[in-house]
Image: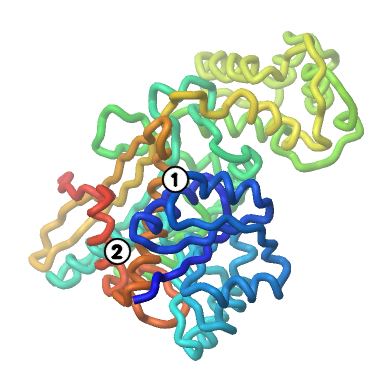
Amino acid sequence: MSTKKVLLLGSGFVTKPTVQVLSDAGISVTVASRELENAQRLAQGIPHTTPISLDVNDSTALDEEVAKHNLVVSLIPYSHHVAVVRSAIKSKKHVVTTSYISPAMAELDKETKEAGITVMNEIGLDPGIDHLYAVKMIDEVHKEGGKILSFLSYCGGLPAPEASDNPLGYRFSWSPRGVLLGLRNAGKWLEDGEVMEVSGENLMSTAKPYFTGYTGFAFQAYPNRDSTSYSKRYAIPEARNVIRGTLRYQGFSDFISVLVDIGFLSENKYDFLTEPILWSKVTQNLLGSSSDKESDLMEAIESKVKFETNTKKEHILAGLRWIGIFSNKEFIQPKGTPLDTLCATLEQKMQYEEGQRDMVMLQHKFEIEHKDNTKETRTSTLCEYGSPGHYSAMAKLVGVPCAVATLLILDGRINKPGILAPVTEELAKPLRTELLKYGIFMVEKTLA
């Protein structure tokens, strides 16, 4: 049998585990990036790999490369996925992505079925591993005649506790801008049978302490975009609570709320952010303070922000001082908007340092009513730590599931055509089984 060939688009930090797993399975992988040196860096030292330069905006070049391979793994920004799938339809090649199915992607379902190709999406961590164990528990309960009364699912990519030593309890493995903009997405969920909504600007006000059952962690949780569709996706119309959201360490939302209130997450352009300036002057301008003295800036903040306690106020003001927004010691090079100016500083101060580990916590919580009307609370939990010098927890838990899905499609164990996501037991079970070989699974427990 001839060697199977995979075209991998992208060279970001989650791609290396994907390439390694495919290479270990004897798959020939063409690593494609717009910048050849990025592809070369990713492929270095990994057998069966060929780095190339490819601009996916060049449809002719994309079509030529797609046609040479059995399957395309698209780990580039989701906005390019539709173009990749359109190309794959032409040459009848399969596709795997870790991104959510967008409306534009869903519209290609008929064409992909006619072409007889499998386009597997949402097979990373969240979305991905979360689906695999949600549908497992739901399917088991339904087969026993029970109901899912409540489904909560929270995931956090975080620094390990020993690396959480900054005001946000967070570190950036990629651009802070994407993380901070995500905090302005509106939230929508089902609570006690009612659809609840919150605007992006008020999202942090919904953050609440969240108890995982693991007492060593102090988390808070808040909704992530629109959860209401999961009543249908997971076939749990009986559920009165359906929430999918994000985990952060406690204190994160208070700090972000203050940054919002004092204008640092604004994307508005200001003339004073066009040339070198002291941080204290930036803060003075945003607050409309009488001067850039630290005492005056703090007073201006207190006039705009309602602190619950003096202890919380002192903690947050100390955090703002740590970031540097009161500093009048050195000039910074602003980036045109408060958000981008802040991001430049956070990128310097809150990157992972050598030897520091990241951590992923993913947990589902199910409130179950059994056939005999008894009730039970179960959890499915995954807690994974990165390995300094090897893979981060996030890279492993996104990259390996993506590779496993690729292998299952290549060997025919997943052969259903269309635009797919692993939200049915039919698709989830073989993926779970294969991921066990890589030590990736969720631990199921009864809480009450």
Distance from the alpha carbon under mark 1 to that under mark 2 = 18 Å
Q: Residue at x 44, y 24 (%)?
A: 355
Point out residue 298 in the picture as x, y percentages from the top left corner. 70, 15
Question: Can I make out residue 398 in this image?
Answer: no
Residue 238, picture quadrant = bottom left
Assign a secondary structure to mark 1.
Answer: helix
Circle 2 residue: 431
Please say if 240 is above or below 426: above
Residue 395's disc number: 1
Assign a secondary structure to mark 2.
Answer: helix
- Given residues 330 and 18, the one toward you in this image is 18
Q: Residue at x 73, y 8 (%)?
A: 295
The quadrant of the image that shows the N terminus is: bottom left
Type of amino acid under label 1: Ala
Point out residue 176 in the picture as x, y percentages from the top left corner. 62, 37
- Given residues 277 and 193, the one toward you in this image is 277
Point out residue 312 in the picture as x, y percentages from the top left corner. 52, 19
Residue 335's disc number: none
Point out residue 122 in the picture as x, y percentages from the top left corner. 44, 63
Q: Residue at x 82, y 17 (%)?
A: 331
Q: Residues within 10 Å of mark 2 (few under 14, many from 20)?
A: many
Q: Is residue 66 left or right of residue 355?
A: right
Please say if 183 is above or below 434: above
Question: Can I make out residue 271 in this image?
Answer: yes
Q: Residue at x 34, y 53 (%)?
A: 152
- Given residues 170 and 231, the one toward you in this image is 170
Residue 172, picture quadrant = top right
Q: Residues within 10 Å of mark 1 (few under 14, many from 20)?
A: many
Type of amino acid under label 2: Leu
